[in-house]
Every structure is written in C-alpha cells, then in structure tokens.
Amino acid sequence: MTPLLDNYKALVEAVAYSSRESRQLLPQILVASKTQPPEVLETMLAQGHRLFGENQVQEAHYKWPPLKQRYPDCRLHLIGSLQTNKVKQAIQLFDVIETLDRPKLAYALARSFRNLNIRRDLLIQVNTGREPQKSGVMPEDFYSLLHLAYNLKLPIIGLMCIPPVNSDPIPHFTMLRSLARTHGLSHLSMGMSDDYRAAISHGTSWIRIGTALFGQK
Ligand SMILES: *Cc1c(COP(=O)(O)O)cnc(C)c1O
C-alpha cells in the first residue's frame, strides 16, 4: 500500500473510533484535494472514496470533469471562497457550495440557479473568529444573510467554519453548532486534520481533511 492509502485507512478507523467514543453519528470524510494532481485523486477514487472538496473553481475546472465522467457518483464540495463572476461555472462543477457568506453572492447564486435551471445545496460559512482577513459572514450578520437566502429560496442545508489557527477550536465548533440548532439547520462542516476529533464530538456532518492524508506541503 502507498502511504496515502495507509493514511486513509488509519483516518477511516480514527474517525469511526471518535464517533463511537463521543456517541455521535459517523461524519463523512471530505478529502480536501486542493493542489493534488489527478493521479492522486484517481488513487482515492479507485479505492472507493467519493467525496472531495476543492478551494478554487479554476483548479477544479481543470482537474475534475474527466474524473467525474469516470466516477459519476463522486461528489464535489466548494470549500474556498467564491467570486460572483465564477458562480455559473461553480454550480456546474460542484454539488455543494459551502461558502455562501455575503448578500451579493446569495443574489448571484439565485440568479444562476434560475438561469441554468439547477439547484445546489448550500452552506453558509460563518467567520466564527471574527477575523477581518477571512471570508465567512460575521456572526452578527448571520441572521440577516440566512433570512435573505430564504427569501431567495436558496437551499441552505447547514453551516461551515474555519477556526483561527493556533487557537482552541472548541468555542468555534460550539458556536457553529448552536447557530445551526437555533435555526433548524441539520448539517455542519467543521474539523480539519488537527481538530477533527473535537469536531466529531460536537456533532459535525463533514470533516475536511488534507494534511492527515497527503502530509505537510
Ligand atoms: C485545505 C483545507 C482543509 C484541509 O485542512 P488540513 O488541515 O490540511 O486537513 C480544510 N478546509 C479548507 C477550507 C481547506 O482549504
């Protein structure tokens, strides 16, 4: 076995263990495959893995269409921020957009859904750490964005966050879970290589994993 497949197997086991220990539902592993070449993705697809996340529309546009053709049941999430001029391309490539974070993007998504007659499940990204340089809606603006999304009939299924680096992620996971519960949203995307166990114990639906599989860049 290659180190990648060893890492994958170990991760699958660790995730199952964490969810049993914390008596939470088993989350799905979203493989964060940014910068990974098609051969690597192919290795994981051949092994049976079907759920991936990419950060950039452009990169995904080059890498994924041939792979999707060979593995039509694979699912792709956009986990990086989305510019409004890329919305049309994004909703044709991705099954789920995790990074709705501002009114302008909500309007653009609604317009493209209508024009192309497609709908994609959406997550709202919340800037739980209130970091100015980071994307995600500020917690105090969350409700008005959700309200707008509902008015535009956007299918919001959950929330996503990226906690600040080098800080305890638990308050962020707790905030995201409580926002989701308050508003009746059932899915959470939180937890990465360093903190997925904590995210699992806070009931996440998806963990987004890169480094634990591919190693440090
Ligand atoms: C790259 C990336 C990840 C994966 O992070 P690791 O720490 O490498 O597991 C998760 N979420 C997002 C949004 C990413 O860009």
Image (cartoon, rainbow, N blue to C red):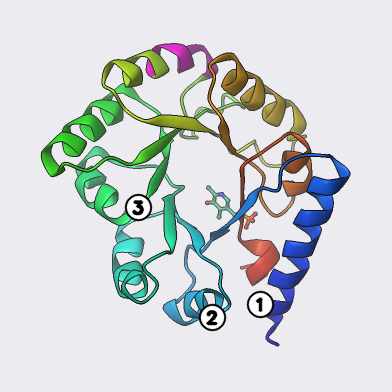
Q: Which residues are magenta?
A: 139-145
Tell me the quarter of the picture where residue 109 sits.
top left
Q: Residue 138, how many percent across, how many down?
A: 50, 20
Q: Which mark is residue 75?
A: none
Q: Left of 34 or right of it: where is 28?
A: right
Q: Give the residue type at disc 3.
A: Phe
The quadrant the C terminus occupies is bottom right
Type of residue at label 2?
A: Thr
Rendered position, 65 above or below 53: below
The amino acid pointed to by label 1 is Leu
Q: Residue furthest right?
A: 21
Instruction: Residue at 17%, 32% (x, y): give it.
Output: 111
Residue 123 is left or right of residue 192, and the answer is left
Does 57 appear above or below 87? Answer: below
Instruction: Find disc 2 in the rendering and name its residue.
Output: 43
| Labels 2 and 1: the sequence-earlier one | 1
How far across and how far down the image is residue 117, in percent?
A: 16, 41
Please, is residue 166 above or below residue 185 in the view?
below
Whole-number angstrom distance, CA of label 2 to CA of label 1:
9 Å
Give the label, 3 or 1, closer to the camera: 3
**Real-space Cα distance between discs 3 and 1?**
24 Å
Q: Which residue has dot 3 on it?
A: 94
142 falls in the magenta region = yes
